[in-house]
Amino acid sequence: MYFAALLARTEDGWEASDTELDDVETLSDLSDLAREALAEAGAEDDTILVFIEQEDAWFGVVRIDGEEDPRIYVSDAAAAARSSYGEILLTDELLGKAPDGSDAAAVDELDALDLDGTEDGEPDGEEASGDEAEDTGAETVPPGPLGDSGVLADLGVPEKDLLTLDGADALSEIADALGASEVLETVR
C-alpha cells in the first residue's frame, strides 16, 4: 500500500493534498506534477514537498524550490528499488551512474586495468572467481538511506534526525517538525 501527498508552503502556512502517481513515470513527471500543484496553491516560487511512502518499508521526500532541480531523499534505496514509485526517485544521478547509464565506479575501475585485462598488481593468469565474475555487470542498489539527507534541515528536520527515521510514522514525524501534521492528516 502506498501513500503520496504534496505539501506546499504558502504565505498562510502548509497546504496538503493527496496525489495519484499513476501517470508519473519519471522524476521530471513528478516535478511537473508538484509545480502544477504549487501554482494551484498560488505559491509558484515557494517550496513544495512530495512525500511517498510504502507502508513500513521505505519513504521518500522530494523537495522542489521554484525552478531549481529537485532534491531527493530515500530512507531505504534497496527497498525503494523494488517499487515502481521508488524507481521514479532512484535516478542515475542519485545512484552515482554516469549519464549513459553505466556505473561511474566501474569506469574508474577500467582505468586500473592493464591491456591484458588484469588489474595493476594482479599476477597474470589468475582468473576471477566464479562469484566475482557473476557480480560484474549486476546492478545493485545500496541498502539504507540515499540522497540529500539535509533536504529538510532548513525547515526544522536536521540531517541526523532524518537519518534515524524509519518507514513507520516517518512522514508524520516530519510533518510534525514542519508544523504541518494537521494538514497532512487531513489527506491520509
Image (cartoon, helix red, strand yellow):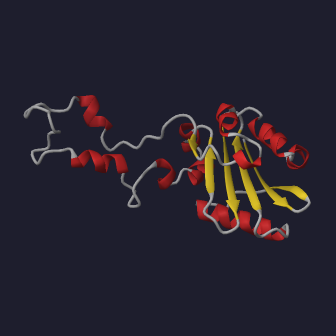
Q: Is residue 108 left or right of residue 72?
A: left
Quadrant of the snapshot with the N terminus: top right
Figure label count: 0
Q: Is residue 27 left or right of residue 131?
A: right
**Residue beneath the point at 84% across and 40% down:** 176
Q: Residue furthest front?
A: 154
Quadrant of the snapshot with the C terminus: top right
Q: Quadrant of residue 128?
A: top left
Can the viewer see residue 93 in this picture? yes
**Residue beneath the point at 75% across and 68% down:** 45
Residue 53 position in % (x across, y down): 70, 43
Q: Is residue 38 above or below residue 61?
A: below
**Residue beneath the point at 30% across and 51% down:** 107
**Residue beneath the point at 58% across and 38% down:** 145
Foreground pick, 159 / 127? 159
Residue 79 position in % (x across, y down): 57, 37
Q: Is residue 52 above or below residue 163?
A: below
Q: Is residue 37 above or below residue 166?
A: below
Q: Is residue 154 left or right of residue 96?
A: right
Residue 186 position in % (x across, y down): 91, 48
Foreground pick, 49 / 158? 158
Residue 153 position in % (x across, y down): 70, 45
Can the viewer see residue 22 in this picture? no
